[in-house]
Amino acid sequence: MFKSLKITCDEATTICDKNQYGAATLLEKMKLGIHFIRCKKCAKYSKQNNLLTILYKGHAKSCKENKICMSKEDKEALKKEFDKIKS
């Protein structure tokens, strides 16, 4: 019975990623929890992955609030550089 709950580290990271986006099933979450008991590296991966997601979401939110656009002069300069490369 318990053999069916054992997963590899590769499977654990896949489930961890799915779990982060709410796509993991209850069985997968159970398998992941059991795997974390014996594999501290995967547990650390999961913590770091969650932290990165939180940081990214915070940064993405602040970026959406502040619209930053290139000036017309910068756009023209960039266009000239592209034209030089094409030629």
Image (cartoon, grey):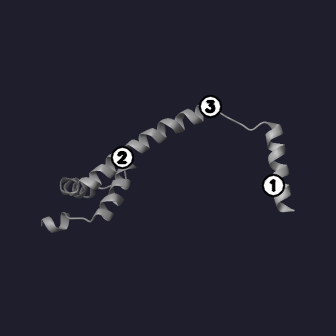
Question: Can you tell which quarter of the image residue 71 is in?
Answer: top right
Residue topped by disc 1: 82
Q: Which residue is mark 2?
A: 48
Q: CA distance from mark 3 to mark 2?
A: 27 Å
Location of the N terminus by quadrant is bottom left
Q: CA distance from mark 3 to mark 1?
A: 27 Å
Residue named by callout 3: 66
Q: Which structural element holds mark 2?
A: helix
The tag earlier along the polypeptide, 2 or 1, is: 2
In this image, 14 relative to 58: left or right? left
Amino acid bearing label 2: Gln
The residue closer to the viewer here, 20 or 27, is: 20
Labelled disc at residue 43: none
User: Residue farthest to the right?
Assistant: 87
Cα–Cα span, label 2 and label 1: 39 Å
From the image, state whether disc 3 or disc 1 is nearer to you.
1
Mark 3 crowd level (few <14, some 14–19, many ≥20, 10 Å Cα): few
Residue 13 on image: x %, y %: 34, 58
Label 1's element?
A: helix
Query: Is residue 36 left or right of 64 when viewed as pictured?
Result: left
Q: Name the N-terminal-most of marks 3 and 2.
A: 2
Residue 4 x %, y %: 18, 67
Left or right of 24? Residue 60 is right
